[in-house]
Image (tube, rainbow, N blue to C red):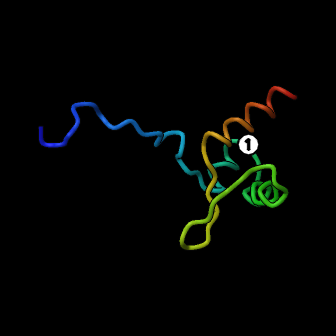
Amino acid sequence: MNGSSDQPHESDDHAAELLTPAQVAKMFHVDPKTVTRWAQAGKLSYMRTLGGHRRYRRDEVVDLLRDSTESS
């Protein structure tokens, strides 16, 4: 054996996919500034890029979207 695995590496790339404020805003049909306010209010967690821009986890955004449509 040469140390390589026959099995593909399982990764959660889809779960860890990051979205821009504009992408999140489009999903909710709101302005990107609204998404920023939600993040500042703690409704949505975010991480910052090296350039200081906010990015949101797709799985968390989808959960929030699902919750908001169920409560309507």
Residue placed at 63% from the left, 60% from the top?
A: 47
Q: Which quadrant of the structure image shows residue 22?
A: bottom right
Residue at left 62%, top 39%? 59
Farthest-out residue, left: 1
Which sits in the foreground, 27 or 19? 19
Residue under the image location 27 percent in, 31 percent down: 7
Q: Looking at the picture, tell me which residue is in the foreground, 49 or 7.
A: 7
Placement of the N terminus among the 4 image quadrants = top left
Q: Nearer the viewer, residue 11 or 4?
A: 4
Relative vertical location of residue 58 with respect to residue 41 in this rendering, above or below: above
As drawn, is 25 to the left or to the right of 72?
left
Where, quadrant-wise, is the C terminus in this rendering?
top right
What x and y, as percent, mark residue 23?
Answer: 62, 50
> Measured from the top left, where is residue 27 in percent x and y?
67, 42
* Image: 55 above or below 11: below
Picture layout, residue 38 above or below residue 69: below
> Quick one: which residue is furthest to the top in this view?
70
> As shown in the figure, which amino acid type bears the numbered disc 1?
Phe
| Apparent side of residue 63 relative to residue 71 in the rendered image (left or right) | left
What residue is disc 1 on?
28
Quarter of the image for residue 31 reads bottom right
Q: Residue 12: give x, y in percent of width and height.
A: 47, 39
Q: Under tag 1, what secondary structure?
A: helix
Near mark 1 (Cα within 10 A), the count class, few <14, some 14-19 or many ≥20, is some
Total numbered badges shown on the rendered structure: 1
**What residue sits 18% from the left and 42% below the top?**
3
- In this view, which residue lies farthest toward the bottom? 51
